[in-house]
Structures are given as structure tokens and as C-alpha cells.
Image (tube, helix red, strand yellow):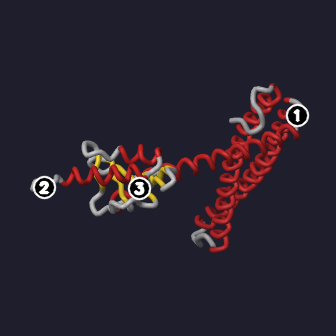
Amino acid sequence: MTRARPWILLCGLLSLTVLALPASAAREAKKTTPAKARVAKGASFRTPSVLKCWTSHEGLRECGNNVPPEYAQEGYSEISSTGVVREKARAPSQEEIEAARQRAEAERVARERFTERATQDRVLLSTFTNEGDVQLASNGKEAVFESRIKLVQTRVADLERNLARLSEHAAQEERSGKGMSPQLRNDLEQVERQIAEHRQFIVDQRHEQEQVRLKSATDLERFRALKSGKVKPGDP
């Protein structure tokens, strides 16, 4: 007696499964022909309530009651007994998850920047009515810095004169052979320290003044663009 080949029996069983399914499910099951696909190892040949089909690593279309673990994350199709086909998308890779996280973060930052710009633009438009007002405010800030710096410069000049006087006194004590007294040494160090602190204050003020000057120029340019309608509040 001639023994039937396993794949012939397999095709016969698949044909019975196809006949038992509605038209849409039958079309999905017909994809599992001996030339292009196979029934997964260990799959049941009875008509399941939900037929699951996936693509193997060899590129073959396989179907069965359950998706093997090695293919469960790759995406597959589910065909119900009523012929409803549902696609199960594959699980995203770690690279895709990270890329999605970065996109979400970039979108969040963009929204925050838009909100911040829109708020600043509304403040700018509500504070000033014309370019002259913007320039006047800028000049006022400049004047405050200049006044503050000049005051400190005057204080530095006074300290330097005091330092010169103390230095002369110290030289006299040295020439007398008695040496510099501890009090005089302390006074000299204190005055030198104050001069250094005041000079650093002037440097810091000049730096801050420059930053404010640049900000004022940017505000004026932005005000012009908003007033002319070239940009809207919040636009880059």
C-alpha cells in the first residue's frame, strides 16, 4: 500500500479548515499553500475559534491556534470564526521606543517654547505702543547701569587714595626701623580687598549692561515684526 506524503495530508486538512471558514477567512487560510507556507509545528488541525497566521523567519506564512513565542512580537493576523480579520502590530524595538521618546520630548520642548514666546510677545505688545517707547525703555536701563557704575568708580577712586595714604604710612614705618604695625597691615589688606571687589562689580555690571542692551535690541526687532504682521505671537 502506497503511503501518502505528509504534505498531501496537510493540504487536505487545511482545505477542510478553509471550507469551514467564511470567505474572508478562507482567503487568508488559502495563503498557506505547500509551495509558500506551512502549518506551524504542533498546531491543531481542528477549526479554531480564532485562526492565527504569521510569517516565519523563512518567509513562509504559517497558521495555527497559537503564535509561537519567537514570532509573537513580530505581528500576526487573527481570523475569527465569523471571518473578522484583526491585525496585531509587531512590538516596537528598543531603538524605535527611544526614537519615539525623543520625538515626544522634542514636541514637548517646542510647545513650551511656543508658549513662552507667545507670553513674551503679549507682554511686549501690551507694554509698548510704538518703537519710540521701546527705545526709551532701553535708554532708561542704560542710564541706570551708567549711574551705578559711575558711583562705584567714584568709590574706587576714594579707596585708591586711601590706599596710597596707607602705603606711604607703611613706608615711613619701615624706614623708621620699627616695621609695619599689625593694624596698618590689616588696613592695607582690607582696602586692597575692597578695591578688588568694587572693580569686579564694575566688570559684572558692564557684562550685564551688554546683555540688557542686546535684549533691548532683540525686543525692538521683535516689536517691529509683530506690529508689521510679519509674525504672530508665539511664532519663531
Contact between marks 1 and 3 (CB within 8 A): the answer is no
Task: Provide residue 57's location: percent of width, then percent of height.
Answer: 29, 50
> Image height check: is 108 above or below 45?
above
Which callout, 2 or 3, points to the residue nearer the camera?
Answer: 2
Mark sitting earlier along the chain (2/3): 2
Residue at 75 percent of width and 30 percent of height: 231
Element marked by disc 3: strand
Residue 133: image tag: 1
Identified by mark 1, the residue type is Asp
Q: Residues within 10 Å of mark 3 (few under 14, many from 20)?
A: many
Residue 52: image tag: 3
Residue at 63 percent of width and 65 percent of height: 189
Identified by mark 2, the residue type is Arg
Element marked by disc 1: helix
Q: Give how far apart the Cα atoms at labels 1 and 3 are.
A: 72 Å
Residues 88 and 94: in front is: 88
Which callout, 1 or 3, points to the residue nearer the camera?
Answer: 3
Residues 40 and 92: in front is: 40
Mark 2 lies on residue: 3
View extreme (front): residue: 1
- Quarter assignment of residue 143: top right
Task: Provide residue 208's location: percent of width, then percent of height.
Answer: 70, 46
Q: Give how far apart the Cα atoms at labels 1 and 2 are.
A: 100 Å
Residue at 83 percent of width and 36 percent of height: 139
Mark sitting earlier along the chain (1/2): 2
Residue 92 seen: no
Residues 132 and 76: in front is: 76
Residue 61 seen: yes
